Image: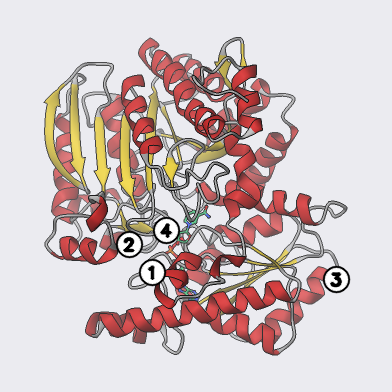
Amino acid sequence: VGAPSEQWREYQGAPTGTDIECEGWRQEAALRMLNNNLDPEVAEKPEELVVYGGTGRAARSWDAYDAILAELRELGDTETLLVQSGKPVGRFETHERAPRVLIANSNLVGKWDDWDHFHELEAKGLIMYGQMTAGSWAYIGTQGIVQGTYETLAALAREHYPDSDGLRGKIVVTGGLGGMGGAQPLAVTMNHGVCIAAEVDERRIDRRIETEYLQEKTDDLDEAIERATAAAENGEPYSVGVHVNAADMLEGLLERGFVPDVVTDQTSAHDELAGYYPAGYTVAEADALRESDPETYVEESLDTMARHVGAILELQERGAVAFEYGNNIRGQVEDHREMDDAFDFPGFVPAYVRPLFCQGKGPFRWAALSGDPADIHRTDEAVRELFPEKESLHRWIELAQEQVSFQGLPSRVCWLGYATEDGLTVRARFALRINELVAEGEISAPVVVTRDHLDAGSVASPNRETEAMQDGSDAVADWPVLNALLNCAAGADIVSVHDGGGVGIGNSLHTNNHVVLDGTDLAAETARRVFTTDPGMGVIRHADAGYDEAVDRAEADDVAVPMRDR
Ligand code: NAD
């Protein structure tokens, strides 16, 4: 990727305040969000342009980063910039209501759609892995995933421990404390539970402790078990990072006869070369092996994954609640190690999240372009004022204010959905109110509203978001393509389409959008359209697949679903 850009060194994150470098706020928002993704507080390895999720990058090279900034500064209010795998490739006159930036990352033609072809093209400098929000400039740090992780664990607790106070007294064992996985300990303690998390890279453990996502660390598994058990017995929330390979840790638990209540994992298993660490090496040794002998690395990495999945299955057999947390570790060992029983534990979407998707609900989020936390606090107030009846949302805002530190631009994530009132969806009502607050000057600069690619109607990913669809449509990728086209038609400010996020190249197709609420009538018009059509795709996608909750939602809100008979 070349040497880090001088501009990036000067920025050290998103520019803030009310003076802008670009011709308008819609372009400025793109420039700030790209730099926010690469804020050293936000990105995992910013000097390599890596934001999170293995090698999820924000730009293809440092030259491409500089060129994107130059383009954004020149981009007119009636122009659209095209970004192909992290490199600006064209700029056209379109019109005011069209997107300002269109992005396509890591997409390959079906037959060539695998890591081998991807790596060949990457070595030639022709493609970049965009993960999900890395290449679409919508990553907001570990805070972006924490509510999703919190809600997933809350749903798990409701299902398996209906008489408990969330996860109080329960021990959750997991692995991976990276950009996303790092949210797990905090999400467990927010649900009052206890978390033991394996992580091979001590710097990542330290980073989670510094940002208060994790409480303590140790190299000693016995000590971790002892402290966790004591906390669970006392009903106290507690989290500990164990500096160890996750596969070794789970086997260590089995050897000791220790069965946690819940077992899952968020190591970057979707990428066997650059994401997952094989057992038997320190991080430095493994990094050296990756450089000197990538083939051996991949074989050892997949061997460790097979042991890792074997241990999860054995813990499940002994009574733990097991689920895969969206890193495709089951698919990896089924495909490469012929483990027939790899899918004998469920993925988190069919297990806990799909009912939310049927309502068009997903990880909606926004960032204050001013950089002023007071602006986000004003948006928190707006959520409370607009939705007085949504108690769990209020509890979330309270918890987030108390426990989630901002990284980079102050931001908030809230799972909001479709349900309409006076013809406006929940997402649209929120966005229109924020736009008014910007217009009235109660919020000091525009707010950009975006979402994860992991959303109700924006992704096809048979081992994750669309696993075990009831009509068998798991691998149909027409839906995310329609979603991106619809986002363009509705005039979102940035629209992106990626391959391979979450689960690796060839395993998923997904999209993202941004809308800049700058207080203008045009922003209101765009927000009303985008925040109806985008969550609406979640409702129609699941209604089409025959989910009753989605058909009910469509009927209640007059969403047109042709040819859908109950
Ligand atoms: P990341 O690359 O930033 O972090 C992964 C971490 O796992 C690193 O800290 C690495 O050191 C550690 N690790 C790798 N192999 C290990 C091993 N064998 N034992 C212990 N630690 C190991 O990735 P991330 O952004 O945290 O994402 C993690 C995974 O979760 C990815 O596969 C990603 O696609 C998936 N993901 C899931 C969701 C979700 O909502 N469930 C969302 C985003 C990402």
Q: Is mark 4 within 8 Å of ligand 1?
A: yes
- Image location of residue 410, percent across then percent down: 48, 41
Q: Which residue is at a point 79% across and 76% down the rendered structure image? A: 229
Earlier sequence position, callout 2 versus callout 4: 2
Q: Which residue is at a point 58% across and 32% down the rendered structure image? A: 416
Q: Which residue is at a point 35% across and 50% down the rendered structure image? A: 134
Report if the CB atoms under discs 2 and 4 are less than 8 Å apart: no
Q: Is mark 3 within 8 Å of ligand 1?
A: no
Gap between marks 1 and 2 measured at Cα: 7 Å
Question: Along the line of sight, which residue is nearer the eye, 12 or 225?
Answer: 225
Residue 55 is marked as 2
| 175 lies left or right of 3 | right
Q: Quadrant of residue 335?
A: bottom left
Report if the CB atoms under discs 1 and 2 are less than 8 Å apart: yes
Residue 275 is marked as 1
Please, what is the three-letter code of the amino acid marked with disc 4?
Val
Q: Is mark 1 within 8 Å of ligand 1?
A: yes
Figure colour scheme: secondary structure
Earlier sequence position, callout 1 versus callout 3: 3
In the depicted structure, whether residue 174 falls above or below residue 424: below
Q: Which residue in the protein does label 3 denote?
A: 233
In the depicted structure, whether residue 340 falls above or below residue 126: below
